[in-house]
Image (tube, rainbow, N blue to C red):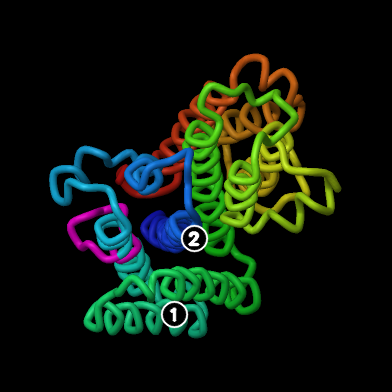
Amino acid sequence: MLSRTADHLYWMARYIERAENMARVLDVTYRMSLVPHAAHSEEDLWMLPVRIVDDVEGFERDYGAYNATNVMRYMALDERNASSIFEALASARENARSVRVAMSSEMWESVNSLWLELQQRVRNGLNEGDYSEFCEWVKSRSHLFRGVTVGTMLRDDGYKFVRLGTFIERADNTARLLDAKYQQLSGSKNVGEDQVDSSEDYYEWSSLLRSVSAMEAYQKVFRDTIDARKVAELLVLRDDMPRSLHTCLDEISPILEKICADRGMECMRQAGELHAKLHFGRMNVIADNGLHEFLQDFIILNNNLGVEIQKTFLNAPR
């Protein structure tokens, strides 16, 4: 496969996954904003999506105040914001257009219709009553694209790069969301504390789980009240949780083994090292050493792996 083709497929998948993850963050933030909060001001609550993408400076330059209207406009539809849902889906569609012959016609139709519908929504504008519906629409269309991909694409190298892009991006977003949300929710509390101190804390932790579609999974696995350590364990170490860091590396490592030749051994080494940290990790050790430090280290290593994949198989780094 041409590296240019692999590059477009890989980034198409990354951008669609990125748009879905941002929709998840915005949706849970909006739902939390509808509940009276003693713990968080409106500014603290709506700063979270901007902090996750590490673009506080850009937002404050263009919008200033943190509120639902400004953050939703900036993170959903602002064409000047490279991290917005609009820009992610625009980039996904452009990458798909460049390699239409390398994917099934159903995949192209899914991406193209998604882009056309998004443009219509931009023209109609996004009102406060539309926020949740818009986020649900982005998530459902991302799910549709993945289902079409799994159901129609030939299991060749192109399919492997689509899956690789999906899980590299998902791992990054899950780590960033958990890190930012944990710091916001826990404050001075330690991740090892096994209790949630109030009904507000309970609702906020459950909203975090819902943002990654993990509420039912948590209830089935732990059959207990929600606490910080178990939420972190589910999203970091559990290999049966679809959006956990461990599951992402369970997918990434075998894909790299299949596509790597001698030139790709560094990719395999980095993926294996990262996978081992999760496969053999223990939550009590991570908690003792600091969850924030662990997640920050993971984000850096996962980014380094993405850079190595880009350098080894794809076009010039983006």
Say which residue label 2 marks: 31
The label number, if any, that marks residue 318 in the structure image: none
Left or right: 121, with 217 as reference point: left
Counting residues from the start of the chain, the first of labels 1 and 2 encountered is 2
Along the viewing direction, whichever of 121 and 10 lies nearer the viewer: 121
Q: Is residue 251 above or below residue 183?
A: below
Q: Is residue 259 above or below residue 51?
A: below
At x 48%, y 52%, the residue is: 36
Along the viewing direction, whichever of 184 and 17 lies nearer the viewer: 184
Residue 11: percent from left, percent from top: 41, 57
* Marks 1,2: beta carbons within 8 A: no
> Is 250 part of what is drawn in magenta?
no
Q: Is residue 296 above or below residue 237?
A: above
Question: Which element type, helix, strand or loop, lies under badge 2?
Answer: helix
Q: Is residue 17 above or below residue 104?
A: above
Left or right: 301, with 287 as reference point: left
Question: Which element type, helix, strand or loop, lies under badge 1?
Answer: helix
Please name the amino acid that badge 2 sits on: Arg
At x 26%, y 62%, the residue is: 73
Say which residue label 1 marks: 108
At x 41%, y 43%, the residue is: 310
Predominant secondary structure in magenta?
loop
> Is 84 part of what is drawn in magenta?
yes
Residue 305: percent from left, percent from top: 49, 35
Q: Quadrant of residue 270?
A: top right
Residue 10 in sight here: no
Please name the amino acid that badge 1 sits on: Trp
Residue 74: percent from left, percent from top: 25, 57
